Image (cartoon, grey):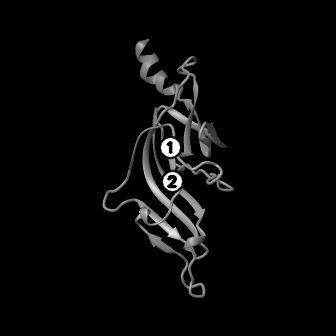
Amino acid sequence: EYSVQLTFREQWLDERLKFDDIGGRLKYLTLTEANRVWMPDLFFSNEKEGHFHNIIMPNVYIRIFPYGSVLYSIRISLTLACPMNLKLYPLDRQVCSLRMASYGWTTADLVFLWKEGDPVQVVKNLHLPRFTLEKFLTDYCNSKTNTGEYSCLKVDLLFKREFSYYLIQIYIPCC
């Protein structure tokens, strides 16, 4: 398993929310209560544990633009399942996924798409004590069941284990 803290953003068009921008003077409306608008039923399918951040104020906002576009942003901490192949340990590389899927809406009603150009951003000063994030790849992971096909997005994170940590902490002291 692995843990992440992320700012999750999704955007969709809901034409029922169109409004007059008063000649361009009103850029958007901001909401802090998510239950006021329809939202996609996204869930993290490989989540083991998760929580929202609510210290001082809930870390969530919704912007509604004049043409009905909705931008939803929230800060989330997740612990996600990541089956690992340890045959080459401690000289191994691991691929861990972050999977986001629709819970109840089939692809006939709801399709998730990656944003064009840089859909995933990683902080520049990312520090992992025992791994290096080599790269990440975005892809689709739709699933078909007896109730229909469900939209799914995934990010595969490629981690390389830092051998120097094991050399200093285990191998040299053992010798």
For residue 164, above or below residue 13:
above
Instruction: Note whether 126 is above or below 39 in the view shown.
Output: above
Above or below 156: residue 16: below
List x then y, in percent, for residue 109. Answer: 62, 54
Disc assigned to residue 44:
1
Q: Residues within 10 Å of mark 2 (few under 14, many from 20)?
A: few
Q: Which residue lies furthest to the left in this view?
A: 56
Amino acid type, callout 2:
Phe
Q: Quadrant of residue 48?
A: top left
Seen from the viewer's position, the closer of residues 28 and 109 is 109
Q: Distance between the residues labelled 2 and 1?
A: 11 Å
Residue carrying label 2: 8
Figure quadrant of residue 25: bottom right
Dot 1 falls on a residue whose secondary structure is strand
For discs 2 and 1, the disc positioned in front in the rendered view? 1
Judge from the rendering whether residue 55 lies leftward or rightward of residue 77; answer left or right.
left
Q: Quadrant of the C terminus?
A: top left
Residue sitting at 53 percent across and 47 percent down?
104
The residue lying toward the viewer, choosing from 163 and 47, is 47
